[in-house]
């Protein structure tokens, strides 16, 4: 059986917003950009058409800095575009910030993605016209290229410009020569349009539009959009009209607010009992049947696949490791796990007997999408596990399993990770039933314990103050080691990554049995070691590893199950999780590690929700 699973780290891209209509554009643009701040960015800017004058304002740093310079009443503009940039080409500064304009400041462009052949385009433009480029970005060439082709028809110029571009993009364009329209085009970077009355919207993600409309169109690859205040028209690559059904957003905008928590990250850690309940209630009925709603594959089709690949990035890669463990344990099917960005450039054996499962919070990470599309070209069936309805990954799939974790705003993934892991466990149990490796009794025992997980997580979260006290005493450590054996190792990987992401402390995870093969040379007095010890069949060996590092002066914090009195004799500190099936322990043991990373980050004064150099979803390679 080939079951090919791809995950992507919920790390992102720039934010894109546009408005045309009956109201002033600036408040809409600023509100929309504020709802996209979670994506990560280093500069922000807007372009407005005010009485046929192109006004461009942009600043390095947070959106608040730009807002201070903009007084709504100063601008009588009813059309505009806005952007938050995460630097890829050129330093994060005002010059490189978007929007970019052409030489005569008549065309303004915002761009999410990367133009791979921008240097060739730039050299060609400089040969055929007298253009002075202001920025170091790839995006500026788009404005000049559209301007070069402009001959009274903005849409035609955009088509011609796009024909010369290679890469990934969501582009929005306004022109003072055609002040009644916004042109947009999408390839491999997310783009949606919102439907209003006497006004229309565009954005890179739904939260930017929820204050104004719940009716949206998802724009597909190689589609162009024409927005006027009264209508939205979608065209394909050959300029043929495209009919697109309206998608009604049902989730509550309030769920994207902090609700009294200091940070979104902390809120999302505490939302995990709720996200577990939501996933379980939608996937399991009263008779303990697991429903893969959205996936129409029959048992025979599942059995026809001849191998399983799990390919992932970052946090989702760690969820993939748990998926490998669960599928091999419950279904007895061998699984390979690889990093998506590496897998894409290897010789693969994907074919029509492969099932490719893409797992992603946003469903927009480029490595994941490109891997998915490569698998599709080779005849594989595509199944995705995603959180965002209507995302690129879900739309390119033959079947979709939604995680229903709700919006995740913090860059460092928490509830999306555990929801992905939970869905993988459910899939593994289902495969165990299909392959007749699990009895009805075993299935009921597993599902019963999964239903206990929300209450167990609540009990772990009740220890938050204790974890905070420990974090406050340890936040000045220059390095932290996480170690585990068996499935605990995968939790150690995720704990270490979360620690690096938001605390900026050098941390790494190792298989505890590898200590003596080199790593133990780094252990010295007061070295902080976090040891996960939830697996009974490896327990004695894990205790020996703890003794090894303590003998070299390490300070050891252990994560173990309640009732484990032996660990108290060995570790300096112990964080207990509720006693559960050992195979399900990773769903709990990661929770105190998320809290530990969070509180260390707070103690260090970091911007927890927007860690430096990171964004919510990677849309460049």
Image: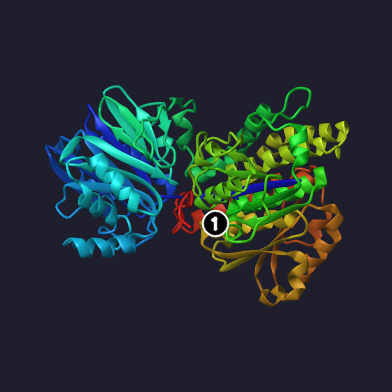
* Residue 254: quadrant of the picture: top left
In this picture, residue 412 sits left or right of residue 85 = right
Q: Nearer the viewer, residue 226 or 317?
A: 226
* Residue 567: quadrant of the picture: bottom right
Identity of the residue drawn at 75% across and 61% down: 571
Residue 465 position, x and y percent, is 60, 47
| Count of numbered circles in the view | 1
Residue 494 position, x and y percent, is 63, 54
Q: Is residue 56 visible?
A: yes
Residue 404 position, x and y percent, is 58, 33
Residue 184 position, x and y percent, is 32, 40
Density class for disc 1 (Cα within 10 Å; few <14, some 14-19, many ≥20) is many
Q: Nearer the viewer, residue 216 or 12?
A: 216
Which residue position is annotated with label 1?
Answer: 600
* Residue 542: quadrant of the picture: bottom right
Q: Is residue 562 visible?
A: no
Give the colour scheme shown.
Answer: rainbow
Vertical position of residue 155 compared to residue 93: above or below: above
Secondary structure found at label 1: helix
Identity of the residue drawn at 44% across and 38% down: 220
In this picture, residue 347 sits left or right of residue 45 = right
């Amino acid at each position: 059986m080939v079951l090919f699973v791809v995950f992507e780290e919920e790390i992102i891209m720039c934010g894109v917003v546009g408005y045309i209509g009956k109201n002033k554009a600036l408040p809409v643009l600023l509100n929309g950009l504020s709802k996209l701040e979670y994506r990560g960015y280093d500069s922000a800017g807007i372009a407005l058409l005010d009485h046929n004058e192109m006004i461009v304002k942009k600043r390095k740093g947070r959106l608040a800095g730009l807002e201070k310079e903009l007084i709504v009443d100063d601008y009588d503009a009813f059309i505009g575009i806005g952007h938050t940039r995460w630097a890829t080409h050129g330093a994060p500064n005002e010059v490189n910030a978007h929007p970019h304009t052409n030489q005569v400041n008549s065309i303004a462009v915002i761009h999410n993605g990367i133009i791979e052949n921008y240097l060739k385009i730039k050299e060609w433009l400089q040969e055929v016209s007298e253009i002075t480029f202001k920025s170091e970005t790839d995006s500026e060439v788009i404005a000049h290229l559209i301007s070069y082709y402009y001959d009274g028809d903005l849409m035609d110029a955009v088509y011609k410009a796009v024909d010369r571009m290679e890469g990934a993009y969501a582009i929005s364009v306004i022109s003072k020569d055609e002040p009644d329209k916004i042109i947009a085009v999408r390839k491999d970077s997310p783009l949606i349009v919102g439907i209003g009355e006497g006004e229309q919207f565009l954005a890179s993600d739904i939260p930017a539009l929820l204050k104004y409309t719940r009716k949206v169109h998802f724009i597909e690859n190689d589609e162009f959009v024409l927005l006027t205040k009264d209508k939205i028209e979608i065209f394909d690559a050959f300029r043929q009209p495209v009919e697109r059904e309206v998608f009604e957003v049902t989730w509550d905008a309030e769920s994207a607010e902090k609700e009294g928590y200091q940070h979104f990250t902390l809120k999302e850690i505490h939302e995990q009992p709720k996200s577990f309940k939501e996933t379980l209630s939608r996937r399991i009925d009263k008779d303990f049947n697991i429903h893969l709603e959205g996936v129409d594959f029959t048992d025979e089709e599942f059995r026809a696949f001849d191998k399983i690949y799990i390919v992932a990035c970052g946090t989702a890669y760690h969820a993939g490791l748990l998926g490998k463990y669960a599928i091999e344990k419950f279904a007895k099917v061998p699984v390979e796990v690889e990093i998506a960005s590496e897998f894409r450039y290897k010789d693969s054996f994907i074919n029509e007997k492969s099932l490719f499962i893409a797992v992603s919070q946003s469903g927009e990470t480029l490595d994941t999408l490109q891997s998915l599309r490569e698998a599709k070209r080779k005849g594989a069936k595509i199944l995705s596990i995603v959180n965002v309805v209507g995302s690129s990954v879900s739309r390119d799939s033959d079947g979709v399993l939604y995680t229903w974790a709700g919006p995740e705003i913090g860059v460092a993934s928490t509830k999306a990770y555990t929801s992905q892991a939970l869905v993988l466990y459910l899939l593994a149990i289902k495969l165990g039933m299909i392959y007749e490796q699990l009895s009805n009794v075993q299935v009921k025992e597993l599902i019963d314990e999964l239903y206990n997980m929300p209450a167990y997580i609540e009990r772990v979260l009740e220890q938050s103050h204790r974890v905070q006290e420990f974090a406050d005493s340890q936040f000045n450590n220059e390095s932290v080691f996480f170690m585990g054996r068996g499935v605990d190792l995968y939790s150690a990987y995720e704990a270490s990554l979360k620690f690096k992401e938001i605390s900026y402390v050098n941390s790494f995870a190792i298989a505890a049995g590898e200590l003596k093969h080199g790593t133990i040379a780094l252990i010295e007095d007061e070295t902080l070691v976090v040891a996960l010890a939830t697996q009974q069949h490896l327990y004695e060996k894990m205790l020996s590893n703890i003794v090894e590092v303590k003998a070299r002066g390490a300070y050891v914090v252990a994560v173990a199950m309640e009732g484990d009195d032996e660990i108290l004799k060995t570790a300096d500190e112990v964080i207990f999780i509720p006693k559960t099936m050992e195979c399900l322990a990773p769903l709990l043991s990661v929770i105190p590690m998320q809290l530990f990373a969070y509180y260390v980050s707070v103690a260090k004064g970091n911007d927890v929700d927007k860690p430096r150099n990171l964004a919510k979803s990677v849309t460049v390679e």
